[in-house]
Image (tube, rainbow, N blue to C red):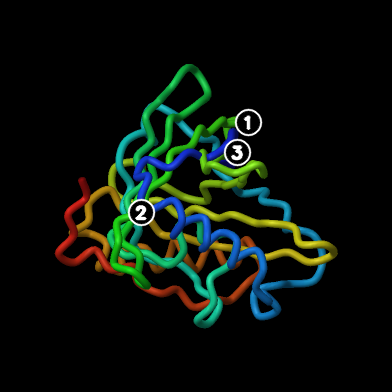
């Protein structure tokens, strides 16, 4: 599981208002369609991560979405050209850069973070937004071959309910349109006890830096 620690800091100053607005809106929205009763599921089948092998670039291929609304697990809101860069920092941490092109404004958005890996399975990410309220999320890797694809999940408790977000990531943007992750996603959903629709993340015509 991956969890990020710290107060998120924006790399692109002019995007702060946009991103901050997205985060505030996400927390303020009605997430009834995303919420499930009870606590987050026990992620028993999360992988023990080889931190060195998992480091590097991961491009977003698919994610589950709850209608037209964003939710608090959409860190940058809905984006195309999403890229997650993990740079190993010490024995059990990553320096994180997450970026993408906003579907709403067409602006490039980015945020840095620090990720700490607990028990080799749980990743806690602390996003560096300029805010008095730290933004911390937890992630687990459900499957990966390290060289081509990875399935990642996050779960957030909201009172007596929870919401789950699932992603398929690829090492190459050219591979993001491939369906070679279908079996991995099906296995992940069985593990989580869910049946959700995955939406492709566009990586067409992207310039990443």
Q: How crowded is mark 1: few (under 14 residues within 10 Å), some or many (20 or more)?
A: some
The 10 Å Cα crowd at callout 3, few under 14, some 14 to 19, many 20 or more, is many
- The relative height of residue 157 versus residue 91 in the rendered view (above or below) is below
Q: Which of 119 and 183 is in front in this view?
A: 119
| Residue behind mark 3 | 124
Q: Mark 1 points at which residue?
A: 118
Lower position in the chain sequence, tag 1 or tag 2: 2
The front one of 116 and 127 is 127
State the separation of the CA atoms marked 1 and 2: 28 Å
Q: Residue 86, relative to residue 24: is it above or below?
A: above
- Measured from the top left, where is residue 30 in percent x and y? 68, 77
Q: Distance between the residues labelled 3 and 2?
A: 21 Å
Mark closer to the observer (1, 3): 3
Q: Are marks 1 and 3 in contact (CB under 8 Å)?
A: yes
Q: Where is residue 40 in the image (x, y as percent from the top left)?
A: 74, 58
Relative horizontal placement of residue 113, taking residue 110 as reference (left or right): right
Give the left or right position of residue 164, taking residue 49 as reference. right
Return the residue found at the far top: 90
Residue at 45% x, 73% y is 198
Say which residue label 2 marks.
Answer: 109
Q: In front of the other: label 1 or label 2?
A: 2
């Amino acid at each position: 599981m991956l969890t990020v620690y710290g107060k998120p800091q924006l790399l692109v100053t002019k995007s702060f208002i946009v991103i901050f607005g997205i985060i505030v809106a996400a927390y303020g929205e009605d997430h009834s369609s995303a919420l499930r009763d009870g606590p987050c599921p026990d992620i028993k089948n999360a992988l023990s991560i080889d931190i060195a092998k998992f480091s590097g670039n991961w491009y977003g291929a698919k994610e589950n979405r709850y209608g037209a609304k964003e939710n608090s697990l959409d860190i940058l809101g809905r984006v195309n050209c999403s890229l997650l860069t993990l740079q190993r920092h010490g024995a059990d941490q990553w320096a994180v850069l997450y970026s993408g092109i906003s579907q709403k404004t067409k602006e490039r958005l980015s945020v840095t973070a620090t990720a700490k890996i607990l028990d080799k399975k749980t990743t806690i990410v602390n996003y560096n937004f300029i805010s008095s309220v730290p933004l911390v999320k937890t992630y687990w890797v459900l499957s990966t071959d390290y060289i081509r694809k990875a399935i990642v999940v996050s779960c957030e408790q909201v009172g007596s309910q929870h919401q789950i977000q699932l992603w398929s990531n690829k090492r190459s943007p050219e591979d993001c349109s491939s369906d070679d992750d279908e079996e991995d996603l099906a296995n992940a959903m069985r593990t989580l006890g869910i049946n959700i629709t995955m939406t492709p993340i566009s990586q067409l015509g992207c310039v990443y830096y």
